[in-house]
């Protein structure tokens, strides 16, 4: 381990058939790691990991993190856990808080216990910008969170509390990564709970108008997937004691409004299909539980992890759009 690139390690990626997990696995397999993917395919897809199934360094466990035995089995012989499995989406958690709680909290503790029992060296986990809740401070700094606005946000806050307690009680090394609106290849564009970015791309490719909830002035720190993969590797390999048992914002560090990102999507997609240039977004009511503005300070991740996001939203958007266009057309 060299504090930057994760090589020749035994890594468990939970939620590895999902958007972020599958991108992490792709990079880790190129770097000679042995990777176990634990996923119950609740929202993930076999198509995201199909390309790895013939790789001798890859193993897929079709299982549920709500089952402690499955977690224990998956953690056997593992050096590093990159825990991505969770039920995402604020609206899903408002509709069904019980299942979100079971997966995101019960499943999280199961994974902590399994990692502890198997003497895993580092437990890196996906937290979320949603923990900032009603805090008005911009940019968001790690030490100042607000009140959660949704059950999903509660689960991510509770994850952070448990990780800290397990670090203190059992001497585990945990690192939480608060992702800010990640986008890129393999992110599911379909279904009621799809994230805004892939949903808008797939809607526009079908020559339909994307629906912006609210007036579109709300802003997000959209983060390209490669930056998130980099952050996971840094968290897995850092030897900086100040980085252990703490949390980091993982974002690009600039925000853009939904109106602006939609215009840019339309512009970039029009290079592939000129008809898309004629489409205008339509506006709907604001959604419950959504944050108005989101912008991260990434100073702490830069300072303690050496995080240096390589892709801004514009470069990432071009790469993501090309991938969706090739896949969806
Ligand atoms: N995408 C984002 O913008 C974003 C932002 C903040 C935080 N996050 C967090 O990052 C992580 C990954 O998110 P993603 O965008 O890749 O979502 P995703 O839905 O694509 O991936 C989540 C994966 O977890 C799996 N999973 C769900 N329940 C499970 C269970 N009970 N047992 C085993 N596997 C289960 C799903 O099948 C899926 O493959 C999540 O923890 C999410 O909360 C994502």
Image (cartoon, grey):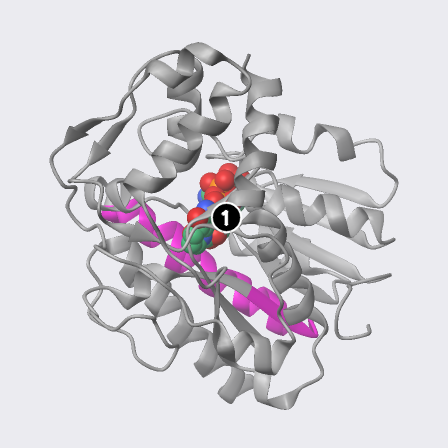
The residue range painted magenta reads 97-124
Considering only vertical position in the picture, is 304 above or below 70? below
Q: Looking at this view, is 222 or 99 the one in front? A: 222
Q: Could you tell me what secondary structure mostly forms the magenta stretch?
A: helix
- Picture coordinates of residue 253, whole percent (x, y): 45, 64
| Residue 189 showing in the rendered view | no
In the shown orientation, is residue 317 left or right of residue 263? right
Residue 17, image x, y percentages: 60, 38
Whether 214 is drawn above or below 8: the answer is above
Residue visible at 31% across and 65% down?
131
**Percent position (x, y) of residue 261?**
38, 40
Task: Indicate the quadrant containing the N terminus: top left, top right, bottom left or bottom right.
Answer: bottom right
Q: Is residue 319 above or below residue 106?
A: above
Left or right of 159? Residue 307 is right
Give 282 or 126, whichever is nearer the viewer.
282
Q: Residues within 10 Å of mark 1 (few under 14, many from 20)?
A: many
Q: Is mark 1 within 8 Å of ligand 1?
A: no
Figure quadrant of residue 4: bottom right
Please tell me which residue is depicted at 30% across the width and 24% down the height of the picture: 210
Q: In the picture, which quadrant includes the C terminus?
A: top right
Residue pictured at 17% horizontal, 30% vertical: 283
Is 268 situated left or right of 32 in this image? left
Can I make out residue 225 in this image?
Answer: yes
The stretch drawn in magenta includes residue 110: yes
Membership of 292 in magenta stretch: no
Residue that badge 1 annotates? 313
Circle 1 — which element? Answer: helix
Front residue of 7 and 74: 7
Q: What is the quadrant of residue 319 in the picture?
A: top right
Q: Is residue 195 left or right of residue 228?
A: left
Q: Position of residue 150 (x, y in %)?
A: 22, 55
């Amino acid at each position: 381990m060299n504090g930057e690139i994760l090589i020749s390690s035994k890594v468990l990626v939970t939620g590895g058939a999902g958007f972020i997990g599958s991108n992490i696995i792709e990079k880790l397999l190129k770097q000679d790691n042995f990777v176990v993917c634990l996923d119950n395919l609740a929202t993930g897809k076999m198509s995201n990991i199909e390309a790895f199934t013939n790789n001798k360094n890859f193993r897929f466990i079709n299982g549920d993190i709500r089952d402690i035995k499955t977690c224990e089995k998956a953690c056997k012989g593992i050096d590093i856990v990159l825990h991505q499995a969770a039920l995402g989406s604020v609206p899903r958690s408002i509709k069904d808080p019980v299942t979100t709680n079971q997966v995101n909290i019960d499943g999280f503790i199961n994974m902590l216990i399994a990692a502890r029992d198997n003497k895993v060296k580092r437990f890196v986990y996906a937290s979320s910008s949603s923990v900032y809740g009603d805090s008005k401070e911009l940019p968001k700094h790690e030490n100042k969170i607000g009140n959660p606005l949704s059950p999903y946000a509660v689960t991510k806050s509770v994850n952070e509390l448990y990780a800290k307690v397990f670090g203190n009680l059992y001497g585990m090394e945990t690192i939480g990564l608060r992702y800010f609106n990640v986008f890129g290849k393999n992110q599911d564009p379909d279904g009621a709970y799809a994230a805004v970015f892939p949903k808008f791309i797939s809607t526009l490719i079908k020559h339909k108008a994307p629906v912006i909830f609210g007036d579109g002035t709300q802003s997000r720190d959209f983060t390209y997937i490669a930056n998130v993969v980099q952050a996971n590797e840094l968290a897995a390999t850092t030897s900086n004691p100040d980085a252990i048992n703490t949390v980091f914002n993982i974002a690009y560090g600039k925000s853009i409004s939904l109106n602006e990102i939609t215009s840019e999507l339309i512009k970039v997609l029009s290079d592939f299909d000129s008809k898309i240039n004629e489409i205008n977004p339509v506006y709907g009511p604001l959604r419950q539980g959504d944050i108005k503005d989101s912008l991260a300070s990434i100073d702490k991740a830069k300072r303690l992890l050496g995080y240096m996001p390589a892709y801004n939203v514009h470069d990432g958007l071009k790469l993501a759009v090309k991938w969706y266009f090739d896949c969806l057309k």
